[in-house]
Amino acid sequence: MSQPTPAMEASAHHFRICHLCEAMCGVDIEHRNGGIVSIKGDKADPFSKGHICPKAVALKDLHEDPDRLRRPVKRVATGWVEISWDEAFDEIETNLRRLRSDHGGDALAVYLGNPTVHTPALLAVPSFVRALGAKQRFSATSVDQLPTMIANQQLFGHQLLFPVPDLDRCEFLLIVGGNPAASNGSLMSAGDVMGRIRGIRERGGRVVVIDPRRTETADKADDHLFVRPGTDFFLLAAMVTEMFAAKVVRLRDFDRLVEGLDALRTALAPYTPESVAAITGVEAARIRALAMDVARAERAAIYGRVGACTQEFGGLTTWLLHVLNILTGNLDRAGGMMFATPPLDMVKLGSPGTYGRQKSRVRGLPAFGGELPVAVLAEEILTPGPGQIRALVTHAGNPVLSTPNGAQMDRALAALDYMVSIDIYINETTRHAHIILPPVSPLERSHMEVGLSPLMVRNAAKWSPALFEPPVDSRQDWQILLALTQRLSGDGGLGRYMRQGMQSVMERLGLDSALDVLLRTGPYGTHAALGKKASVLSRMGAVLRPDGEGLSLKKLRAHPHGIDLGPLLPQLQARLEKMRRRIPLLPAVYEADLPRARQALTNFDATQMRVIGRRHVRSNNSWMHNSHRLVKGPSRCTALLHPDDAARLGIADGAPVKLASRVGAIELPAELSDAVMPGVVSVPHGFGHGRAGVKLRVAQAEAAGPSLNDIIDDQLVDAVSGTAVLNGMAVEVSAV
Ligand SMILES: Nc1nc2c(c(=O)[nH]1)N[C@H]1C(S)=C(S)[C@@H](COP(=O)(O)OP(=O)(O)OC[C@H]3O[C@@H](n4cnc5c(=O)[nH]c(N)nc54)[C@H](O)[C@@H]3O)O[C@H]1N2
Ligand SMILES: Nc1nc2c(c(=O)[nH]1)N[C@H]1C(S)=C(S)[C@@H](COP(=O)(O)OP(=O)(O)OC[C@H]3O[C@@H](n4cnc5c(=O)[nH]c(N)nc54)[C@H](O)[C@@H]3O)O[C@H]1N2
Ligand code: SF4
Ligand SMILES: [Mo]
């Protein structure tokens, strides 16, 4: 039970944003005497209109979970002991400063996990990373959307200019490697995403899914094409060639804003529907028909997600997804792929991103935006020599289960001189930390979507207060990061970075005031004009001025269900004109990777079984298996196999099957289904809780499972981005 806040007694209902996935649903939490009575969809939320998924109710389980850490813990010979915050910060400061002065910033690394972007504490991360002085930065981005960010930067000039499907107005939606029926939508934040997709069909439009599995989303679409894993680039390239051949390329206003159209046509000419049919497993006639359907649709959105990014040709694939939207005249146009105008101007706040300025020490993989691909993290820890990583700080990440070659990652983390985790659980990763610093429960802090706001399919703003008073002597993520920033930055605590910008606002007035400054100076703010020019320091003054008409924290407090800010608006042309930039259709980074694709076209071994991933609506990556409500029932950690493959390999439904690769082997029950393409085996990631020392009682007892990433090879990456090949790796499948 938690202490009720005074506000709580006045009302038994609390309205907030569910922070668990990208959908940003509004929830209505009924509570009494510090306990949660029920969690339902908030019908008055203009963005989600009452929709939620089964995970929303697990917010209660997360809040009440006895395994969730409440105090800092330190690892000692006999196990874990609770220590005070001061003791924890002192010890961390001493150790990290010592390693930094002995070995330099190269010896320090940081890994930022996925929930880092699901908290406004994201604003405190850049100063923390600078203060830590870690030269080697990693995050879950390189096992996720990195290829899309590189494509954004290469084509549009900024990594955060994410095109999102204008779901409410489009008439043709092509989904490549995404399963919103399970994920609730990704790189497209949409309350009730499947309702919106249903809307396309109800308006007479069409939805087509390209996926090696006939997914829950495919079942709700007009058409589904099985594609052999890792071969989408070839399919999309053939569609481009076909559009040129049929003279249906239609650039509309982008005519004068692109360059390299002829070079693009020539580079992709070898890929025709006929030449790619064998590798993709899609008949030439179907590729041709799809190209024509997309080109002729009045308003089409061509969208790709995890299956398109985390594969051998993730870079080339995401590039062509952008290109196809341009060639069909659907970029930045109502009903096509558009750009959000979020209440906090993230494009202005974030840097555009730089490609390849740094290379990893051991394997020479390129950095993007100062960040290295996580596929090299373990080897950078395990390979001796100057620049070897000796200390690691993780924030909301579980790389042992979520990055390739998990067993090697396990060994690497155990070999570190020092490790700190900012996390709520003792799990597969954090069990290696010397100290774990836990933030409060998500219901004990305020919330606003910051990092995900550029992904909204309709503009909206919402801020939620804390439901419960945080326990005495507890810290929120941003407070932990701020304390570490103060301790680790330059001399005397208040270093260079502390004296300026957002960090200074946070330090003096708190995170919510920092959000207020950004809201007021954002595109809808009371001081929007100021935001256009002012430096961060002069923006601070904005909070002290009287209210104008626009958005401010005060206004959002007065609208607990959120405020609708209207449909997406065209903006890319104006941005490009301002940047004096044209869109290069064939950037050099992709051109340089084309020979690799040409080689694959001739060398591809179609006889090998290939493994792909799978998500379930009641699961969330690796960290929500400790809720009995979510994991109960038959195990979902199964290997989906086509009955023909099973018969050939002598594998019966439900029998154990072994999957093996260069780096390891796992065993799990087979589940036979013709929903998966022959030659493909589908396995969910995020399991593997059976490891010793993990303190997740429900997950261990009810949903341990093997970890898919124990067989995913860390040496296999997309050459452009260094993103791990989580989908499409060749694997040996056998009966046990
Ligand atoms: N319930 C739930 N929701 C989640 C999450 C979760 O774990 N559980 N995770 C969240 C996160 S971090 C993310 S990034 C998003 C992900 O959101 P999505 O990308 O929508 O989710 P996935 O289920 O991973 O969908 C990937 C699809 O790609 C297919 N695929 C695999 N290989 C290929 C290929 O080579 N080509 C093609 N065309 N398709 C391929 C897979 O079969 C799968 O259906 O979901 C978020 N939401
Ligand atoms: N094979 C395969 N591997 C995959 C994927 C796949 O499809 N297939 N998907 C990839 C994708 S898309 C992603 S995003 C990554 C995710 O990779 P990670 O981000 O490394 O892993 P998560 O499972 O999201 O773990 C989140 C961690 O944050 C902690 N946590 C939760 N909430 C909070 C909080 O509020 N504050 C703090 N400080 N900690 C918190 C949890 O306890 C957990 O340790 O996995 C990737 N790995
Ligand atoms: S879809 Fe589910 S997990 Fe995602 S925000 Fe909505 S309720 Fe939360
Ligand atoms: Mo992700």
Image (cartoon, rainbow, N blue to C red):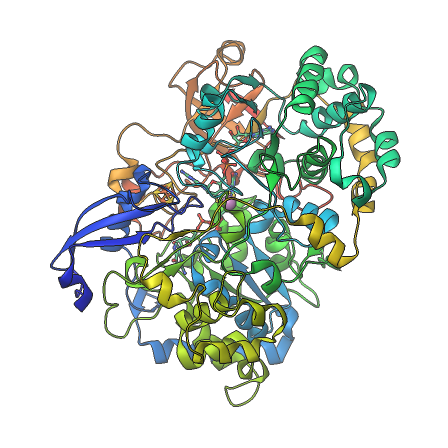
Quadrant that contains the C terminus: top left
Count all numbered tags in the image, as a single digit: 0
Q: Is residue 586 visible?
A: no
Residue 428 vertical placement versus 108 (above, below): above
Residue with the most extreme front position: 549
Q: Quadrant of ligand 3?
A: top left
Residue 539 x %, y %: 54, 76
Q: For the point 75% across and 23% down, which residue is it?
A: 238
Q: Quadrant of the N terminus?
A: bottom left
Give coordinates of residue 679: x percent, y percent. 58, 18
Residue 147 placement (x, y as % from top left): 66, 44
* 1 to the left or right of 556: left
Foreground residue among 693 and 194: 194
Q: Position of residue 723 (x, y in %)?
A: 64, 45
| Location of residue 354 by image quarter | bottom right
Residue 646 versus residue 290: which sits nearer the camera? 290
Q: Quadrant of residue 705?
A: top left
Instruction: Out of 565 and 400, give the one closest to the viewer.
Output: 565
- Which residue is painted at 54% across and 10% down in the image? 648
Position of 679 compared to 696: left or right?
Answer: right
Q: Does residue 232 appear in this view?
A: yes
Horizontal relation, residue 85 to residue 483: left or right: left
When the figure is inspected, residue 456 is found, relative to residue 316, above or below; the finding is below
Q: Is residue 291 above or below residue 267?
A: above
Looking at the image, the residue that sits furthest to the left is 33
